[in-house]
Image (tube, grey):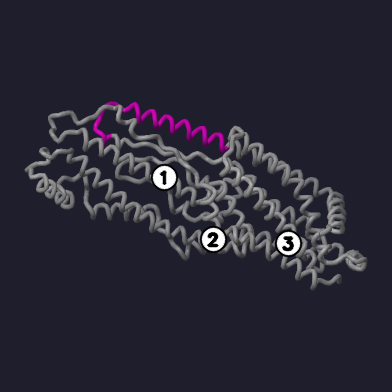
């Protein structure tokens, strides 16, 4: 299908746009913001990852430098888990500033970030953090509306609209041409931004990128392109349906405010109200209460663990734990770790279910707000969303549990029940616990997690073509 007429309309619109000196100033301002966002994202990424690598290395060295000692004391000495940022987090900060990237890991205790602050923030708007994604998702749509509010309405006011239509140009051609015209202006910002983005992304990975990261980057670019194109069409449709440019501008500013500020804030508040989550204090308190109900593994007279001791003595037909063929204390610590971890995981799953409902509510709202849909997809691809944080938390907990149980197993195997013998083992065993390495979610996990937001974006684009078709049949020149 030839788009000759549409291209002519787009070229004419682009020339008319740059007759306005204010466009140069605004475009320059946003261009500077994009450069600043790229620089601050680079600086934040390098600083955080260098810090994480430094302290992860120091934590590992401290662990290995421990002298000969009781393995259970080593489990209490603990370790640290650090999360490195992914390369796309340079452009999309997401909820990264809310979470932190380090967790202290120790026996019998699971340390977490403040759930009450971090639990439901998928639609949180943070103007204090200027990222490339923030500029693309919030400021460029505003620029699009500024460029397009009079794209058709001005033609109507000047009397040229009726003349254009009388020369054989259809409404469909006019709407598409104006949309392409706005898009061509926006691409002057978008394309250089993408070139810088890709170069920085490659540089951060020493030009050695995986298939997984490549797909994420391509989707990041593709979805933002569709998102901006959507707003170009919205600007033209509102302008075409408005009697005056002033009315079109007011309507478009209202749409921008609803999409980027009012709905995100309202969605967050409603979701948190409907699915209320416990505070961190209550969460930890409930865990402690349930653990105490099960018993205290450090208390030799605790009924639960005394029953275990009595059963072991009967099975091995001995009259004291010192005569057992394995270290009794290590066995009890293993049982205590298993029980406390199961209790914690049960409470965590209950809490995550609440946050899952909150986030599902947010994702459902994306069907009436393309900004929320785009924000969710962008954060998911950048591994800066809430699901990525929970994935890190779970990987750290798996590592913590394995570390504690490894130390307990060493105690069972090497520490004698005879108190007259040494209660420590050789420090070489500390290397048996591997160093923690966080693995970000893969592309298929991200797509599965953000399927609702992706469907809503596709639906919005599909509806857009329908709106243009309907508008082309019903719009009037006067």
Give yes or no for residue 39 being in the magenta stretch.
no
Give the dominant element type of the magenta stretch: helix, strand or loop: helix
Crowd band around label 2 with a 10 angstrom C-alpha radius: few (<14), some (14–19), many (20+): many
Circles 3 and 2: CB atoms closer than 8 Å: no
Apparent side of residue 121 relative to residue 103 in the rendered image (left or right):
right
In depth, the one of 331 and 299 nearer the eye is 331
Residue labelled with disc 2: 362
Q: How far from the left and from the top, in percent, is residue 146?
A: 76, 55
Q: Residue at x 59, y 54 (%)?
A: 375
Foreground mark, 2 or 1, reads 1
> Would you say residue 33 is visible in this rendering?
no
* Badge count: 3
Please give the residue where the numbered disc 1 appears in the rendered image. 395
Which residue does the image show at 26% across and 27% down from the upper left?
Answer: 426
Which region of the structure is painted magenta? 44-73
Which residue appears at 86% of the width and 52% of the height?
Answer: 11
- Mark 1 vs mark 3, foreground winner is 1
Identify the mark nearer the N-term, 1 or 3.
3
- Give residue 300's quadrant in the image: top left
Which image quadrant: the C terminus?
bottom right
Q: Image quarter for residue 108?
A: top left
Mark 1, residues whose alpha carbon is within 10 Å: few (<14), some, or many (≥20)? some
The residue indicated by pointer 3 is 234
Give the left or right position of residue 454, taking residue 111 as reference. right
Q: Position of residue 245 (x, y in %)?
A: 81, 63
Q: Nearer the viewer, residue 3 or 172?
A: 3
């Amino acid at each position: 299908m030839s788009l000759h007429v549409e291209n002519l309309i787009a070229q004419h619109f682009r020339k008319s746009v740059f007759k306005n000196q204010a466009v140069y100033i605004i475009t320059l301002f946003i261009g500077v913001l994009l450069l600043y966002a790229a620089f601050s994202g680079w600086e934040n990424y390098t600083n955080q990852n260098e810090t994480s690598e430094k302290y992860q290395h120091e934590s590992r060295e401290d662990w290995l430098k421990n002298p000969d000692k009781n393995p259970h004391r080593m489990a209490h000495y603990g370790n640290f888990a650090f999360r490195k940022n992914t390369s796309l987090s340079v452009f999309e900060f997401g909820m990264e500033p809310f979470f932190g990237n380090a967790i202290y890991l120790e026996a019998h205790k699971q340390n977490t970030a403040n759930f009450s602050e971090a639990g439901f923030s998928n639609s949180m708007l943070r103007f204090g953090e200027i990222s490339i994604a923030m500029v693309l998702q919030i400021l460029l749509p505003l620029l699009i509306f500024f460029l397009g509010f009079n794209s058709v309405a001005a033609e109507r006011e000047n009397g040229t609209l009726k003349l254009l239509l009388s020369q054989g140009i259809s409404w469909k051609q006019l709407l598409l041409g104006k949309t392409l015209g706005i898009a061509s202006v926006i691409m002057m910002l978008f394309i250089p931004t993408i070139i810088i983005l890709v170069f920085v992304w490659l540089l951060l990975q020493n030009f050695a990128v995986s298939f997984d990261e490549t797909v994420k980057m391509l989707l990041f670019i593709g979805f933002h392109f569709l998102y901006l194109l959507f707003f170009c069409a919205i600007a033209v449709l509102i302008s075409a349906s408005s009697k005056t440019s002033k009315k079109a501008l007011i309507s478009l500013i209202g749409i921008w405010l609803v999409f980027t500020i009012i709905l995100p804030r309202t969605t967050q508040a409603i979701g948190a109200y409907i699915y209320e989550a416990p505070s961190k204090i209550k969460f930890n308190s409930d865990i402690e209460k349930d653990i105490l109900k099960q018993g205290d593994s450090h208390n030799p007279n605790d009924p639960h663990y005394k029953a275990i001791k009595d059963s072991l003595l009967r099975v091995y037909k001995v009259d004291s734990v010192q005569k057992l063929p394995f270290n009794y204390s290590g066995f009890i610590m293993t049982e205590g770790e298993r029980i406390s971890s199961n209790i914690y995981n049960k409470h965590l799953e209950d809490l995550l279910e609440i946050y899952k409902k909150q986030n599902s509510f947010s994702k459902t709202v994306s069907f009436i707000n393309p900004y929320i849909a785009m924000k969710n997809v962008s954060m998911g691809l950048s591994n800066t969303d809430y699901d990525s944080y929970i994935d890190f938390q779970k990987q750290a907990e798996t590592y913590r549990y394995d570390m504690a149980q490894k130390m307990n197993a060493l105690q069972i195997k090497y520490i004698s029940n005879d108190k007259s013998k040494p209660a420590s083992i050789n420090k070489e065993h500390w290397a048996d616990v591997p160093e923690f390495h966080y693995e970000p979610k893969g592309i298929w996990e991200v797509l599965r997690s953000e399927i609702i937001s992706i469907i809503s974006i596709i639906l919005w684009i599909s509806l857009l073509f329908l709106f243009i078709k309907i508008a082309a049949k019903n719009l009037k020149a006067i």
